Image: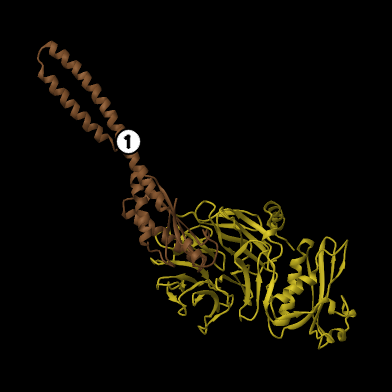
């Protein structure tokens, strides 16, 4: 197994930038009424010294966060089995546990985690697995186990072993703010600062393989699009045009980047070939055309335009060159993002003067408002389509929040200090 | 450069006088007297021209100072209504003061467009540009050459007031002249 070099690189960056301030904390606000009770027993440890990470706690909080599960509290557990032979189902039935997860962690050069999942009511082993990786990636190994458990219990691939990009801002009263483009695990742990600037940093986005990010930085005193390789740290300025250079969006095949430029007058959508850097203009309208995002098949793009007077979502199909309007409900629909199923579209939707996150089903054309706070923006869908992250304000601070696509589960991820905004959920990471 | 024509006019007048004096004499003595008179007149002309130049400079710097004061009074920030890039009467009045100064001093400017926090960040970036362009176009229509104006939009990224509410939002929907 090969591990990306940026892990090493960014440890240096942490020391340099003092990044820990951008650390997110999780506050669950709404869950399901009848969550599945699962006991994640502390994993046994075989190695030198104390265990480097409480793997069971990582899994516990992963499952708790998504709302469908109610992890059993440790002090309610009547035993601490780590092997199948030590499991007594009656100990778990008596405390209404439906599923039981046990595991064993050992480490020499690498970490090795073996784990077993049991159905307590049926008294059977449902799944067994092994995860291997470097010791300093222990948390990520835990998230991978969470992914497996989630898939076993829901039939949907988990999205815990993924990462988040976001912009953390430290407001300086009467001076220039600090903008920190930050990369963290999907639970907000292990934040790493990729870029620190006193000028705005905006619109972070992922390459489809999860190896690169792109964003808009004002470090040259005007907006410009940059790409940055997470493995090598190499950075490239892609645009330096007069006017807007914004909203980068990699195509699903990684060959093309959609972006917004206003060099020819008003903001329009352009496609940049990532090898030749050649530009193709795809919208031509005196109105604002912005916020392009790709449909998963790469054959069309959604974008925001106020060509009808107010911002609404439109679709541009590459083959035919046809543009059609998708949203009609409400005076303001903007910044769409599409789930991998190509059906669920999330966007910022205005109702009664408030900005919420709404979900549009492209098949039924039904629009459902998912959030109730009033300055919600920047929705980003998990690669498995089950949850989305967005930015909002809470107690006067910019925070991240999450909601399930059915609107039933909600949790907040404020930073310990300062404001956080513009979350971008990574694709599934290639191992 | 602007005051030279005035100095020129003074010089022309004086040289005309000298010419008339010079033409009135016919013998050598007259010629000597004429030459002396010419020298005196020339010195007087030069001093008058210098004085005129000084006066003109003083007048010009007084005018510049007046325009600078007028521009300072109206400030360098022009405000907008929600989701609008239309110049308000107050913004136009303030801009006129700056345009008068710019037509006088020939400086280049940078216009920075901003929005309030409502709505999406990238749409707001475009809206901020629209506001900066509205100011640029008004300046252009009033004699400021396009190459002297740079526009940039910061969208909602650099608020003046950080609170959520109209009192903060109205301060943040703006174009700043730099």
Q: Residue furthest bottom?
A: A122
Find residue A288 and report its horizontal and vertical position in percent: 43, 66
Q: Quadrant of the C terminus of chain A?
A: bottom right
| Rendering coords of residue A131 (x, y %) | 78, 70
Q: Colour of chain A?
A: yellow
Residue tagged by mark 1?
A: B57
Of residue A317 and residue B109, the one placed in the foreground of this image is: B109
Q: Could you tell me how many numbered marks the image carries?
A: 1
The answer to which image quadrant residue B6 occupies is top left
Which color scheme did the rendering employ for the protein?
by chain
Where disc 1 sits, the SS reads: helix
Give coordinates of residue A429: x percent, y percent: 67, 67
Q: Is residue B134 above or below residue B2?
A: below
Farthest top residue in view: B28
Relative depth, front residue between A59 and A8: A59
Residue A348 showing in the rendered view: no
Q: Chain of mark 1?
A: B
The one nearer the camera, A343 or B53, is B53
**Res A305 seen here:** yes
Q: Image quadrant for the N terminus of chain A?
A: bottom right
Residue B16 in the figure: left or right of residue A406:
left
Drawn side of residue B103 relative to residue A224, left or right: left
Question: Horizontally, is A427 left or right of A50 in the view?
Answer: left
Tell me if A56 is positioned left or right of B34 in this view: right
Q: Closest to the observer: A202 or B7?
A: B7
Q: Residue at x 39, y 60 (%)?
A: A265
**Colour in which chain B is shown?**
brown
């Amino acid at each position: 197994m090969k591990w990306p070099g940026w892990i090493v690189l960014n440890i240096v960056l942490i020391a340099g930038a003092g990044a820990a301030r951008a650390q997110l904390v999780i506050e669950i606000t709404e869950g399901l009424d009848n969550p599945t009770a699962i006991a994640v027993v502390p994993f046994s440890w075989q190695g030198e010294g104390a265990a480097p990470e409480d793997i069971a706690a990582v899994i516990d909080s992963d499952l708790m966060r998504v709302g469908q599960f109610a992890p059993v509290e440790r002090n309610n557990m009547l035993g601490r089995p780590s092997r199948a032979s030590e499991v007594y189902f009656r100990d778990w039935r008596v405390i209404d546990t439906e599923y039981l997860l046990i595991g064993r962690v050992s480490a020499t050069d690498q970490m090795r985690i073996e784990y077993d999942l049991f159905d307590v009511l049926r008294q059977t082993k449902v799944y067994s697995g092994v995860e291997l990786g470097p010791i300093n990636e222990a948390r990520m190994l835990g998230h991978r186990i969470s992914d497996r458990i989630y898939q076993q219990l829901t039939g949907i691939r988990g999205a815990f072993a993924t990462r988040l990009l976001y912009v953390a801002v430290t407001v300086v009263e009467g001076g220039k703010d600090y903008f920190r483009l930050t990369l963290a695990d999907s639970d907000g742990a292990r934040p790493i600062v990729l870029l620190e600037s006193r000028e705005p940093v905006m619109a972070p986005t992922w390459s489809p393989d999860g190896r690169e990010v792109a964003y808009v930085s004002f470090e040259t005193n005007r907006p410009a699009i940059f790409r940055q390789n997470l493995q090598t740290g190499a950075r490239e300025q892609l645009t330096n045009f007069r006017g807007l250079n914004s909203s980068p969006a990699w195509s699903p095949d990684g060959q093309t980047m959609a972006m917004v430029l206003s060099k020819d007058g008003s903001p329009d959508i352009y496609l940049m070939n990532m090898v030749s850097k050649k530009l193709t203009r795809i919208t031509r309208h005196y109105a604002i055309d912005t916020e392009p995002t790709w449909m998963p098949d790469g054959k069309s793009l959604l974008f925001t335009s106020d060509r009808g007077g107010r911002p609404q979502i439109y679709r541009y199909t590459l083959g035919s060159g046809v543009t059609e309007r998708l949203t009609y409900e409400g005076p303001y629909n903007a910044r769409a993002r599409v789930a991998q199923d190509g059906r669920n579209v999330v966007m910022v939707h205005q109702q009664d003067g408030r900005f919420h996150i709404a979900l549009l089903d492209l098949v039924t054309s039904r629009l459902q408002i998912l959030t109730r706070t009033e300055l919600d923006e920047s929705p980003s869908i998990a690669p498995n389509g089950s949850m989305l992250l967005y930015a909002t304000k809470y107690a006067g601070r910019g925070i991240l929040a999450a909601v399930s696509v059915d609107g039933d589960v909600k949790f907040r991820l404020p930073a310990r200090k300062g404001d956080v905004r513009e979350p971008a959920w990574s694709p599934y990471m290639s191992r | 450069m602007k005051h030279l024509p005035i100095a020129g006019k003074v010089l022309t007048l004086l040289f005309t006088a000298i010419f008339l004096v010079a033409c009135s004499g016919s013998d050598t003595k007259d010629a000597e007297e004429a030459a002396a008179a010419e020298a005196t007149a020339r010195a007087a002309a030069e001093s008058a021209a210098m004085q005129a130049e000084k006066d003109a400079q003083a007048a010009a710097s007084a005018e510049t100072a007046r325009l600078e004061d007028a521009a300072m009074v109206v400030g360098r920030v022009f405000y907008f209504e929600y989701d609008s890039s239309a110049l308000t009467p107050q913004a136009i009045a303030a801009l006129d003061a700056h345009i008068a100064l710019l037509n006088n001093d020939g400086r280049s400017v940078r216009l920075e467009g901003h929005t309030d926090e409502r709505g999406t960040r990238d749409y707001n970036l475009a809206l901020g540009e629209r506001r900066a362009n509205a100011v640029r176009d008004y300046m252009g229509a009033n004699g400021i050459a396009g190459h002297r104006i740079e526009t940039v939009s910061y969208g909602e990224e650099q608020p003046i007031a950080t609170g959520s509410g109209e009192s903060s939002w109205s301060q943040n929907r703006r174009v700043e002249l730099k």
